[in-house]
Image (cartoon, rainbow, N blue to C red):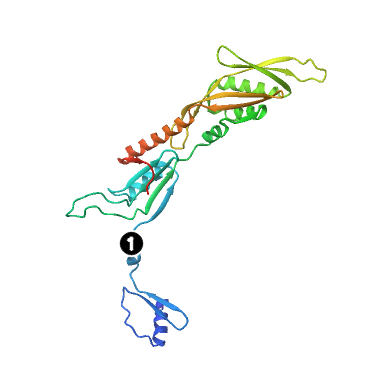
Amino acid sequence: MTTRTENDALIDALTDAQISEQLNPGGFYAFKLRDRVETIDLRDPDETRPARKKGTVRVDDLASFVHYYRKHCDAQSEVYVDIQAGVITAVLDAHEGWVSEEERGYMPRWGEHRLTLRLAETDAWRRWAGLDRQFLKQAAFADFIDDNRADIRKPTAADMLELVQQFQAKTKVTFSSATLLASGDRRLTFEEETTAGGGAKGSIEVPSTLELGIAPFEDSEPYVVTARFRYRIQGGALYMGIWLDNATDVRRDAIRTVVAKLQEELGIVVMRGTPA
């Protein structure tokens, strides 16, 4: 039993319509019929492959970038890094440089086969950077510190737990002032709120800085980041915040470190900037 294809049926239809043309293997044909245009593709499947590679592939980590780059690069491929955005871009079919006038000279190429990696920030970095220069109410700030104690190197985890417990316990108090200690820490004074008045007074000592150990990106190592405590007293209510001292420098250095790894791994030069 012979199996008929769609092309066979179309050829019969064209014959019935009295269209006579020799159809040769390897050809692609289009015919206008009374109410439509029909095509017949007799090319070998290998001949219908794209003439060149194009498109942008986006990967999520450095290992994937290295794998794809090695698979598709050639001697003329180029790689760029945008330090501000944290984006690495490879132009796999970049323009060819000078070879020789006898061979080909300068050969332009399409520059349409690209590979990009946007360095992914860690959850810890996003949390602390999101709090940078923001004031929270006393209880909310204490909860944040408690939830993220694992990122704090100094003071110790035990000291931070004690501080958090003091903040959580002193919610029904009126803060009045803060004193700068010789160590640079702050002593916050408060008076407990009571219905009869004359509540007990007390104080909480708050460190001037925190030393954090956090990695800016998934592909980078942890860095030491200094966070300074800040406070406001408004109407007896305490608001706390942190100022990250060197976050921008740390982020840029982490990107440069990732780029250095990439250059060493692939034996290439990564240029600063973005491709056209």
- Residue at position x 41%, y 87% from top? 16
Q: Nearer the viewer, residue 3 or 172?
A: 172
- From this view, report whether residue 263 is shown above or below residue 74: above
x, y percent for residue 260 = 35, 35
Residue 82 is left or right of residue 231, and the answer is left
Residue 3 position within the rendered picture, expressed as x and y whole percent measured from the top left: 41, 78
Q: Position of residue 50 (x, y in %)?
A: 35, 62
Where is mark 1, residue-wise? 51
User: Depth check: 175 or 126 in front?
Assistant: 175
Q: Is residue 1 visible?
A: no
Quarter containing the N terminus: bottom left
Crowding near the residue tagged with mark 1, few <14, some 14–19, many ≥20 C-alpha atoms within 10 Å: few
Q: Classify residue 268 by image quadrant.
A: top left
To which quarter of the image does residue 130 belong?
top right
The kind of residue on which mark 1 rests is: Ala
Is residue 97 something that shows in the picture?
yes
Q: Residue at x 76, y 20 (%)?
A: 193
Query: Which residue is more in the foreground, 190 or 158?
Result: 190
Q: Please give the name of the residue rendered at 75% of the width and 14% of the height, measured from the top-left corner.
A: 200
Q: Residue furthest right?
A: 196
Question: Which residue reaches farthest top?
Answer: 182
Question: Element under label 1?
Answer: loop
